[in-house]
Image (cartoon, rainbow, N blue to C red):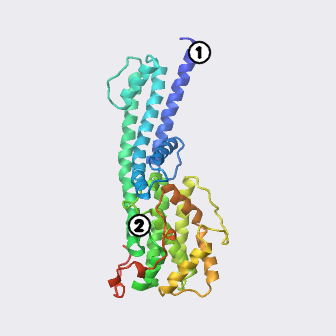
């Protein structure tokens, strides 16, 4: 064998082995590693899949149409990524088969495909070929097993996330509104009951930040109901806490502060994973997507519903903006990235008195503690 050809085959074997190792590490980072890992090898498959889905559901189509299409994006992309990894493994082994002398490249690809899919229709008597075939078959089975084992973890985290998102409709309507939430609690239980809700949502945010970076595909899993969105739910809860701390005349509850902080930290962790830019140390006076006029509308509705408010409205606006500025950029970016439905800020501003059944408005009822 000429020296040049020998060198080429050695390089081909090394490159093929490297590709297989990188592919398996990519799968381990995605399916096994319990921490955020933005894998560059898998990223092209996600991007190509998203572009195809965006072409199928362009922005000019109605929201419900796009929601039906994009509901398939995350599940389909998981299958696409698995096929992509298997194809890379097959390509790497094809190079190794060719390097050890298994005929032409076409024959090497044929043997590699037969091995990775455990079909067994091709074989070779070349020394070392059987060992490579067995190892490739094992890796192909491992990739499929990893995906199968990964699914229960994904759907377990998805179910826990959606539980509170669904419960929020009971308390804050759809889309979840901070105004409706505050007025409903004031009317039914009293605003002191918000403390229990802050505790539960702080835990929700903590789990959200962990699961949606360790299992990033969860970010794109859409709620079972088209009008629901985990992004809108997160924004409504933080807005409610921000209004309670800035404008509503209540005793100071540091749990509301902790909930806001847990919320914007979780959203920032997710934003970091997807390379979303934001100011990590914003000033209280920095502008947000909510202007003073919209804030004043909120205050007017709360006041008309009988919610006790602080007298200094200018200071209330400064305080609210000071809270909102911590999560506004990442919230808007994630809403756009996940194609969330319009938030409560983009809908008519109403209180719980306007959304409850007329015959129930004057009946004294109570709602259970967050469960």
Q: Is residue 283 visible?
A: yes
Q: Is residue 183 above or below residue 131?
A: below
Q: Residue at x 35, y 79 (%)?
A: 368
Q: Position of residue 316 (x, y in %)?
A: 61, 81
Vertical relation: 150 (above or below) 195: above
Task: Identify which residue, 321 or 90, lies in the foreground.
Answer: 321
Asked if one can make out residue 221 in the rendered structure from this viewpoint, the answer is no
Q: Quadrant of the C terminus?
A: bottom left
Report the front residue among 149 and 316: 316
* Tag shown at residue 77: none
Residue 21 rendering spot, x and y as whole percentages: 49, 35
Mark 1 → mark 2, Cα distance in angstroms = 63 Å
Q: Position of residue 280 (x, y in %)?
A: 63, 62
Disc 1 or disc 2, which is closer to the eye? 2
Q: Which residue is mark 1?
A: 4
Q: Position of residue 282 (x, y in %)?
A: 66, 66
Q: Which mark is residue 165?
A: 2
Q: Is residue 6 above or below residue 241?
A: above
Query: Disc 1 or 2, which lies upstream in sequence?
Result: 1
Q: Residue furthest top?
A: 1
Secondary structure found at label 2: helix
Residue drawn at x 66%, y 65% is 281
* Residue 84 figure quarter: top left
């Amino acid at each position: 064998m000429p020296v040049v050809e020998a060198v080429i085959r050695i390089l081909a074997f090394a490159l093929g082995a490297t590709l297989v190792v990188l592919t398996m590490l990519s799968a381990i980072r995605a399916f096994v590693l319990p921490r955020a890992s933005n894998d560059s090898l898998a990223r092209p498959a996600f991007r190509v899949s998203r572009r195809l889905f965006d072409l199928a559901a362009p922005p000019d189509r109605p929201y419900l149409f796009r929601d039906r299409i994009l509901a398939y994006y995350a599940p389909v992309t998981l299958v696409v990524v698995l096929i992509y990894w298997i194809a890379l493994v097959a390509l790497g082994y094809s190079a190794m088969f060719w390097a050890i002398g298994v005929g032409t490249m076409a024959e090497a690809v044929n043997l590699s495909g037969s091995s990775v899919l455990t079909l067994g229709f091709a074989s070779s008597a070349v020394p070392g070929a059987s060992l490579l075939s067995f190892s490739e078959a094992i890796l192909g089975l491992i990739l499929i097993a990893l995906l199968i084992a990964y699914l229960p973890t994904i759907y377990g985290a998805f179910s826990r996330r959606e539980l509170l998102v669904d419960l929020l409709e009971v308390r804050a309507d759809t889309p979840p509104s901070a105004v409706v939430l505050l007025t409903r609690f004031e009317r039914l239980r009293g605003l002191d009951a918000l403390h229990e809700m802050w505790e539960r949502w702080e835990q929700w945010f903590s789990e959200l930040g962990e699961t949606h970076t360790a299992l990033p595909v969860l970010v794109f899993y859409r709620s079972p109901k088209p009008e629901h969105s985990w992004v809108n739910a997160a924004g409504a809860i933080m807005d409610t806490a921000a209004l309670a701390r800035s404008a509503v005349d209540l005793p100071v509850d540091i749990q509301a502060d902790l909930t806001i902080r847990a919320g914007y930290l979780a959203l920032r962790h997710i934003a970091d994973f997807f390379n979303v830019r934001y100011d990590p140390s914003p000033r209280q006076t920095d502008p947000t997507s909510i202007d003073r006029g919209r804030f004043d509308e909120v205050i007017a509705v709360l006041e008309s519903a009988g919610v006790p408010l602080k007298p200094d409205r200018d200071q209330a606006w400064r305080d609210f903006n000071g809270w909102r500025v911590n999560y506004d950029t990442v919230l808007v970016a994630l809403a756009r990235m996940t194609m969330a439905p319009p938030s409560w800020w983009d809908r008519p501003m109403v209180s719980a008195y306007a959304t409850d059944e007329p015959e129930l408005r004057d009946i004294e009822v109570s709602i259970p503690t967050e469960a």
